[in-house]
Image (tube, coloured by chain):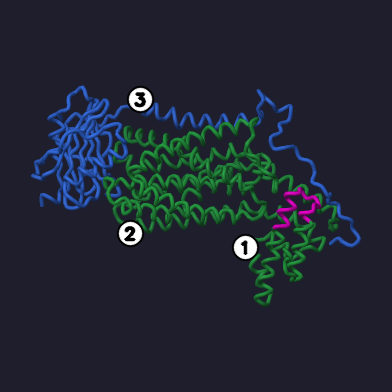
Amino acid sequence: MPDPETEVSSAASAPRFEPDERWVPADERRFGLDRRTLRPTLAVFALVFVMSVVLPVINATVPYHDRVRAGDVMEIEGDVTFVPEAGWGITSGLRASHAPLSGAYPATATVEDGAMKFTLRTGSFHGDADKLLDQIETTSDALNRGRGVHVTGAPTTIVTDQGKQGATVRVTGPHTAGVIAAFVFDSRGVEAVATGPSDAGSEPSTAVLRMIGSVSHSAEGK
Amino acid sequence: MTTPTLADLDRARDVALDLSGWGRRFVFYQPRNFAFWGYLALVGIGVHTFLSTLTREYNAYGEAIGLAVTSFAIYAALFWWFTDRIDHYAKLPHKLMVVAFLWGGFAATGAMAVNANDAILALYAKTFGQVWALNWGAGLAAPFNEEVAKGSGLLLLIALAQRHIRTAFDGFILGAFIGLGFQIVEDITYAMTSAGTQFGANQIGASVSTIVLRMVSGVAAHILYSAIFCAGVVYLLGRPAEPRKIGRGLLLIAIPMLLHGTWDSLAAIAGPSALTLIGLLIATVVVALIIVARVYRLTVTRERDFVRDVLAPEQARNVITPVELDAMAGNRKARKAYRKANRSRRERRRARYILNAAYALADELAAARGADTDRVRFARSEVGRIRAGIPSPW
């Protein structure tokens, strides 16, 4: 170990000069930028382009091939099912008896036919169908803030093939029109939303009415 | 073997400070740095996306958003403190940690991963069917999109802070902060989604279980994945203080992807048995924690060497003792053993203060690039004062 008494410290009293963080050596400048920072930044931009442009564009060009066959039944969480119209495309959700490995069905299912879209969604809810419809309207208004789809007209009663009474209301938006139906099975709320282009008329099609009528809860019939 | 002279030790200190970048000031505003503009643009897009969603949903789910933001802010503060605490060798500037956090929170999520996840999940469903996509889609989309989105931020950070990010440990720490940002924003988004699961009614009840679950599972999630991934990126690229090790780099990049994929596929792997799911959850967390602890030990060695090189001249000048130097450049156990070696409680407490003052001296030496400035001399005198048991005049 060196003897501090005899050895003179070599530490300088002022820090050695280091160029400012923003300084760029003259031979590293390109278009006023630090040449060394171009490649990593362009590499990140390329990744962003692939992730945010290329992949979504590829996805948009690939159509859904999964078509509803006669006799298909869609199932969502909580043993809620509906019978989709044959020929419509399944864009999300699962057929009954085709559960994922976890055994848990997703909470929503959507089928589409051209610009027509039918979505069934479920969640826990305490109250009756009218209250659920009010809640859906309140949440939808809060999310849309007067823009987009909004409720028009008074709610009416709707009864499913299973005999379950629900509430329904018409909705319209700038370019869409449709119907929302609400049912409550025990403490499980079910919302059916069917929308299509507004020029197709405000009356729900028979296909939509059939799908709403087919909504059922397996525990209900038992 | 010849004993190094003080001049040799001072030179070794200068080399260590140059190599490590320890103590250098980080300047964020660098208009001539292309990475600065890239970072600003992508974080800007992410902030805009997140705030647009938040303001839109706030009207409907205000209560749940309030709860989620408050809870995750506290959670983030705890993780921030912990991650900052483990970086107690050649410390990185706090400003750089904030820059990393913001990348993870906004650019990696809103400008990158979300778009890619949605597209790939839909493509999986179209190609392999809805059931397959539900089983394996998340596990085969998120690990690639999210880890790459987070990890790519380190490329920009290296370009922004070339003089600071020098070791795999720097990548490990910054990766943890990138992961923390990602985790917090993702958690808030999950809480917003769950607030709507009961049609907007009972928002708190609907979101609280998600918040708790995300907090518990977050212990071994994005923070950990990104820390390992970014350490791997540094090994893969090589830095002035970290020679390139391609194999190790690729392995450390692959491990978090595998962990992430396993985590996202647990429900499918476990099947309908809740017990199996819980068992697998715990096993995955344990494995992840063991791996991250090993990566920490692997990467921190170089940082400890820097501490030894920076403080060796102080030991030679009798400012600190050889035992103190060993404790400072050692692990937590070494510091604990050093403190416990003192008999009385008062001596143990003083030993702790001496180490803290010596770490502060190391930071001052780093900021002064090894020069003998007034601040360094004062920090040195503080070590002596505490050792002598003299109360602070300040």
Q: Which residue is mark 3?
A: A61
Q: Which residue is mark 2?
A: B275
Quarter of the figure with the N terminus of chain B = bottom right
Secondary structure mostly seen in magenta is helix
| Residue B331: percent from left, percent from top | 64, 61
Query: Where residue B197 is drawn, which disc sits there?
Result: none
Query: Rounded to the nearest whole Å, what is the CA distance between mark 3 and mark 2?
Result: 42 Å
Q: Colour of chain B?
A: green
Q: Is residue B348 visible?
A: yes
In the displayed orientation, state which residue is furthest to the right: A6
Q: Is residue B255 visible?
A: no
Q: Is residue B74 left or right of residue A169?
A: right
Amino acid type for the residue under numbered disc 2 = Leu
| SS type, badge 2 | helix
Q: Which residue is mark 1?
A: B332
Q: Chain of mark 3?
A: A
Q: Is residue B230 magenta?
A: no
Amino acid type for the residue under numbered disc 3 = Thr
Amino acid type for the residue under numbered disc 1 = Arg
